[in-house]
Image: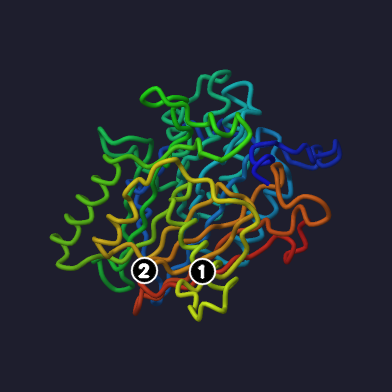
Amino acid sequence: MNQQRRLFIPILGAMLLAALAPASPAAAQEREGGEEAGHHLRFTKGKFTIVQFTDTQDGPNTDPRTIALIRTVLDDQKPDLVVFTGDQLTGASKTPDDVRRAIDNIVRPVDERRIPWLVAFGNHDEDHTPRTGLDEAAMLKIYRSYPYNVNRVGPVGVTGTGNVNLLVRGSGSEAPAFAVWALDSGRYAPAKIAGQVLDEDALLGWGWMPTWDWIKHDQVSWYTTTSEKLEREHGRKIPALMFFHIPLQEFRTMYDNDAYKRAHPELGLLPQHGVVGERNEDECPGPFNSGLFAAALERGDVKGIFVGHDHVNDYVGNYFGIQLGYSANSGFATYGLGGSENHRMRGARVFQVDERDPAGFKTRMVRAIDYGIQ
């Protein structure tokens, strides 16, 4: 599956393309949305629901099944917040208007339902930039122009675009009961570091060294400093979920640890991380341990870290008190399982947070195939 990771499979016929109603993004350019407009996040009757869409990964002629999935999940789950965790777009856009149309296709269903939403960026979101001239900062400006987007520009001097911390207020209080973090996990690692080529072993036909990006030290420092500030201001740590695109190396360590124990019952060692779900391709993190997991472990406020990137993984496990999990991809225009099961895993991840015990959130996948979308 690694050889297929970034191949885009042309699956749309002319009739499907024609079935997609043309989007008109012009109006979005003139709006000013965001949390500043008053869309504060809040528990309702003690409940807060989040839906994660990831890897919609398409261009201006978005696969209508992707849009149908988004609409159907929103109507079924009625979330309080939607998080897009990267690779919203591909390099298919040729003009700035193409980019605006591609964005509008996936976010308009959320915005028109008046649901607060945010985006984190993935490694493919700037693939079109050399042709369109729109980088992440320009795209973030487009996203933030929608009335119900709650992204912010991001902290000055911190690597990435749109790193953000959002607070969820209690049902009957202005005090925060929960928090949501979203980070920009970058795109690709440099081709050469300290004179060493990252993918040289793969080119020679053996080994495998990841060439994706990693979360940087200043982002980890920003998270730690902000987390400490919130604790000082509110007299306690605020339990939280954290979202970004590229997985941490700890995902692989967690999965392999449980898998090895399951494969060797003669050792008498029980899997301790409770990993459930599917792993259909190798994890594709960056080449270096970012230190983010260790920082979250030490702070003790982040209770779950969820990503996309590896389209056909959807497993979740508890790694020393922090749930690490994937959402399988939401987009129909990019690779899936292949063969007759190509679209089986496409879907979205749902999180149910209870105000009485926000650290004990529940999560599950909902799949397009279960809604009759395939």
Picture residue at 50% right of the left edge, 35% below the top: 211
Q: Residue at x 31, y 49 (%)?
A: 291
Q: Nearer the viewer, residue 194 or 40?
A: 194
C-alpha gap between disc 1 and disc 2: 13 Å
| Circle 2: residue type | Phe
Q: Which numbered disc flags the more N-terminal residue, 1 or 2?
A: 1
Q: Is residue 294 left or right of residue 184?
A: left
Residue 258: assigned label: 1
Task: Please determine whether, in this image, residue 361 is positioned above or below residue 160.
Answer: below
Disc number placed over residue 320 in the picture, else none: 2
Q: Residue at x 68, y 56 (%)?
A: 346
**Of circles 1 and 2, which is in front?**
1
Neighbourhood count class around disc 2 (C-alpha, 10 Å): few under 14, some 14–19, many 20 upward: few
Q: Can you name the residue that lies furthest to the front here? A: 266
Secondary structure under the numbered disc 1 in the rendered image: helix
Quadrant including the C terminus: bottom right
